Amino acid sequence: MRPAMFLDRDGTVNVDTGFVRRAADVALIPGAARAIARLNAAQVPVVIVTNQSGLGRGILSTAEYVAVRDRVAELLREHANAHVDATYECPHDPRLGECACRKPGTALFARAAHDLDLALDRSWYVGDRWRDIAPALELGGEGILVPGAGTPDDDLRTAHERARVVDTLGEVVDAVLASLAVAR
C-alpha cells in the first residue's frame, strides 16, 4: 500500500467560484498543475475528493459536473502534462442530514484506499477548508490547509492548532517530496 495526496478540488486545484457549473468558467489556481505534475513524476497517487452539494440541491446537473471535472483534467494536461488518478465526489445536500461521504466524513477516502490500494495513515489531506483536512485526524495521515480567499477564519485557526498551514500547493508538494526522499 502506498501513500497518496488527497486534494480538495474547488479552491485547491481550481478557482472556487461558488458552484462551478460551466466548464468554460474553470480556471486552475496558479501553480496547481505544476505541483500535481511533480507528484505524478514521483509516482505519488493524486486523488481528488470533493463535496458537490450542488448536485443534490439541483443547482448543477450531473452532465455539468462531469464537464467541469473533465475540464479540470484537460487543463492539468495542457498546463503541465499532469493528471489525477481518481476523483470521488459527494453529491448529497447537507441540508437533508449527514452522510458518511461528505467531508469531513471519511467514506470516500476509504473507497479510494480500497480501489487504489492506498495507505490512508501515510497520506496527505490537502484543501482550503478545515473539512477537507479534518479526515487526516481520523485516518492517521497529515492534514495541510492551503488557505484561499474563501477560507473561513475559524478554519484557519483550527488548522494552525491541529494540522499544518502552508501558502501554496507547491509548498505542500515540496514538503511531501522532501519527506519521501528522507524515508527512502
Image: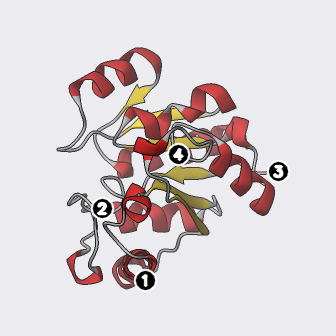
User: Could you tell me which secondary element the residue under label 1 belongs to?
Assistant: helix
Q: Mark 4 to mark 3: distance in Å?
A: 24 Å
Residue 74, position as x, y percentages in the image: 40, 84
Q: Nearer the viewer, residue 22 or 99?
A: 99
According to the image, label 2 marks what residue? 31
Q: Which residue is mark 4?
A: 102
Quadrant of residue 176 within the rendered picture = top right
Residue 122's x, y, as percent?
69, 38
**Label 1 to label 4, Cα distance in Å?**
20 Å
Q: Amino acid at mark 3?
A: Met
Distance from disc 1 to disc 2, alpha carbons, whole Å, reads 28 Å
Residue at 34% of width from left, 71% of height from top?
60
**N-term mark: 1 or 4:** 1
Q: Are marks 1 and 2 in contact (CB under 8 Å)?
A: no
The type of residue carrying mark 4 is Arg
Q: Which mark is residue 63?
A: 1
Distance in Å between CA atoms under marks 2 and 3: 28 Å
**Measured along the vertical axis of the image, is residue 19 above or below residue 97?**
below
Amino acid carrying mark 2 in the image = Gly
Q: Which residue is mark 3?
A: 1
> SS class of the residue under badge 4?
loop
Q: Quadrant of residue 84?
A: bottom right
13 relative position to 109: left or right: left
